[in-house]
Amino acid sequence: MAHDPAPAATKQSKLVIRNIGLMLSGALENPILDADTVVAVNGRITAIGRAKDVDQAHATTTIDANGTALAPGLIDSHVHPVAGDWTPRQSQLNWIDSTLNGGVTTMISAGEVHTPGRPRDVIGLKALAISAQRQFSNFRPSGVKVHAGAPCIEPEMVEQDFADLAAAGVTLLGEVGLGGVKDGPTAKRMVAWARKYGIQSTIHTGGPSIPGSGLIDADVVLEADTDVVGHINGGHTALPDGQIRCICEGCKRALEIVHNGNERAALYALRTAREIGQLERVILGTDGPAGSGVQPLGILRMVAMLSALGELPAEQALCLATGNTARMRKLDCGLIEIGRAADFVFLDKAQHSAGATLLKSVELGDLPGVGMVVIDGEVTCGRSRNTPPAGRVPVVL
Ligand SMILES: [Zn+2]
């Protein structure tokens, strides 16, 4: 078949974004790139550089960034989706669309735990996870990539259950502790089974979230050895500082800070991670929808809070919501890098911020204005309806 003509090429899409004022890579080791133009072909980044050095010919979409900043689309490492863009937790519709307006392009489920009548028997919880995985891979609310289908483990599960889940396409575990497994030895055994079959895991850290959930302390977190230490700052009740430090120092796993957690503990975890030189482990989530509600700007609020109060340069704070999460969770987005998904958020200083620049405004605790969001090379949102208005916004030419 070597001489057959290539199959009829499906129409190629080429996105060119030019006139970018500040290129924020999402990579902690090099957060600002010397570039003003990005090209993406069929939803993947193919070139990053100065306008004169980049092939802009035959673009199907051209965006003039109008001097705004370009960052990778934000990643929310911790959400609890249920069905499409509806959540029963606070009886809300379109919470994911609202979060897209907060610059979030990818969400990761920590368990579909708010499903009314959630099954807790083994076959039922497996069925729910497989169904959620299918639903959200078949349907992206407003274009947002929701990685869902995250079962919460129960003591009756056996190794074969994890093999079955993986074979059916499940890649995540819900927060350990939200199911019946709350002790270290059982959690450790099941997390190891999950890992053996390529399923990534997370754990509820801290006091109970709502009546019916339980305490997970540092000993259980360290023994369970999940890939992500879910809400190290509590969800909302945090562990004592000593235990937070113990977790930071006692493992190499991702340290997740959430909006729905304790802000003081968030800052303590951030400072501890910096002190031990492991800021690359810190990732951000909202834990929404939760008792505290839906937080459409939750990730941007965490970035501003950690930057302003944690005295973290804004370009680094943004990495906690993008590249760090992508790397710790093995996602193909989250960095402005050739080959990555073309998921972007355009940011500018909010109108009337006291900060002289976008980065200075965030370091003063102001939220940036979102001017546009792009997912897989396609514009999914223009000027945000939720952030304070950006000074400048990009334009599709
Ligand atoms: Zn939790």
Image (cartoon, helix red, strand yellow):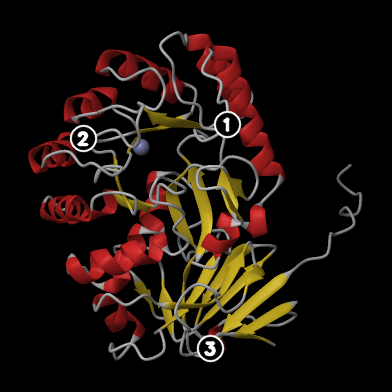
Residue drawn at the location 60% of the way across and 68% of the way down? 374
- Give the residue pinned by disc 3: 19
In the image, ligand 1 is in what quadrant?
top left
Going by the image, does 185 lie left or right of 74?
Answer: left
Image x and y of residue 372, in percent: 57, 76
Residue 103 visible somewhere in the drawing: yes
Task: Classify 47 as above or below 145.
Answer: below
Foreground pick, 5 / 244? 244
Q: Amino acid at mark 1?
A: Pro
Beta carbon at label 3 within 8 Å of ligand 1? no
Residue 332 visible somewhere in the drawing: no
Q: Which mark is residue 251?
A: 2
Marks 2 and 1, how far apart at CA: 35 Å
Q: Amino acid at mark 2?
A: Cys
Q: Quadrant of the N terminus?
A: top right
Q: Which mark is residue 116?
A: 1
Q: Amino acid at mark 3?
A: Asn
Q: Earlier in the sequence, mark 3 or mark 1?
A: 3
Which quadrant of the structure image shows residue 196? Answer: top left
Foreground pick, 101 / 378? 101
Task: Classify 332 as above or below 384.
Answer: above
Image x and y of residue 222, in percent: 22, 28
Which quadrant of the structure image shows residue 148? Answer: top right
Q: Which mark is residue 80?
A: none
Marks 3 and 1, how far apart at CA: 48 Å
Task: Classify 59 as above or below 287.
Answer: below
Give neighbour class at mark 2: few <14, some 14-19, many 20+ (Cα, 10 Å).
some
CB contact under 8 Å: marks 2 and 1: no
